[in-house]
Image (cartoon, helix red, strand yellow):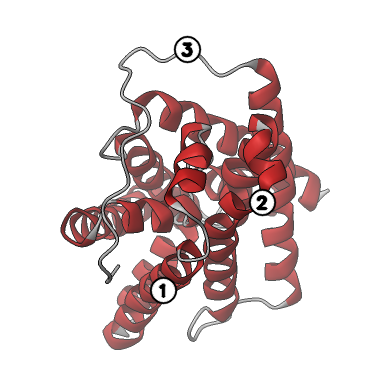
Amino acid sequence: MAGPRPRQPATKRFVNRPAPTPTVLLAVALGGALGGTLRWWLGDLAPDGTGFPWTTFAINVSGSLALALLPLVAMVRARPALAVGLGPGLLGGYTTLSTYAEQGRGLLADGRPVLAAAYLAGTLAACLVAVTLAGRLSNRAWRAEFASEDGNE
Amino acid sequence: MTPLLVALGAAVGATLRFWVGHHLDDRWPTGTLLVNVAGSFVLGLVVGASPSESAVALVGTGLCGGLTTYSAFAVQTRDLGPARGAAYAIVTVGLALAASALGFLVGQA
């Protein structure tokens, strides 16, 4: 979060936005199914266990990094269905905040507040570093174009 | 069977999140905050109730996992800038934790 970069301009200011098209919704659904399945598969391959939930940590950091890299890809910016299929769909389905919160709750309930705090703050810090560094590779116009296509939902 | 249930739940969850975010996210990402907290509540409920493996796959791993997002949360936090971003991150994590705990308690009851 550190750095002198000015705040992103709000790219959508309409109270009554037109509803998303069926194509866009289908792209999100397909991407979400794929991303959710990938997350499940990784969790099956390397279950989180009772300590630091490294698998979910890795999923959330890699997914956040990938989302911040998407505005770099001209083909993604040029096709709204691809932007939402990959951003809110694939990567939104792949990453999870519910499991993260539930794991934090579980660690606290187990009487491991230090581990819980390390996990909750560590994931947040790692994801913010990843998206901040990735954001330096793209320019403001590309990020605004991607955001205006609902890529960051 | 399990991956199919996860895929189905995640497809519905992701679409719902997108729809809510599309209509409610503005300078402040109200929609994403809402789905992240709601998904954390429901997952807490599922874990507390410990239902069948299929129900966990469909509703927990699939629906709640697809409904909530860390990637959008991280990018939105960055784009809000240091002060508002910090507020957004603290509110999201705090409310999601509280919702998860509340859901867990309700699920166990």
Closest to the observer, B91 or A76:
A76
Residue under the image location 73 percent in, 53 percent down = A37
Question: Mark 1 = which residue?
Answer: A129
Q: Quadrant of residue A121?
A: bottom left
- Please give the chain letter of the residue carrying mark 2: A
Q: Nearer the viewer, mark 1 or mark 2?
A: 2
Q: CA distance from mark 1 to mark 2?
A: 20 Å
Closest to the observer, B64 or A69:
A69
Q: CA distance from mark 2 to mark 3?
A: 26 Å
Q: Secondary structure at mark 2?
A: loop
Q: Secondary structure at mark 3?
A: loop
Residue under the image location 40 percent in, 39 percent down = B35
Q: Quadrant of residue B78?
A: bottom left
* Residue B9 showing in the rendered view: no
Closest to the observer, B33 or A20:
A20
Closest to the observer, B12 or A103:
B12
Residue type at mark 3 is: Pro
Is the same chain shared between marks 2 and 3? yes
Question: Mark 2 = which residue?
Answer: A73
* In this view, B34 is above or below B92: above
* Residue A8 showing in the rendered view: yes
Crowding around mark 2 (Cα neighbors within 10 Å: few <14, some 14 to 19, many 20+) is few
Question: Mark 3 = which residue?
Answer: A18
Give x and y (percent) for residue A21.
62, 16
Residue under the image location 37 percent in, 55 percent down = B104
Residue type at mark 1 is: Val
- Please give the chain letter of the residue carrying mark 3: A
Crowding around mark 3 (Cα neighbors within 10 Å: few <14, some 14 to 19, many 20+) is few
Q: Is residue A40 left or right of residue A10?
A: right
Q: CA distance from mark 1 to mark 3?
A: 34 Å
Is the same chain shared between marks 1 and 2? yes
* In this view, A84 is above or below A15: below
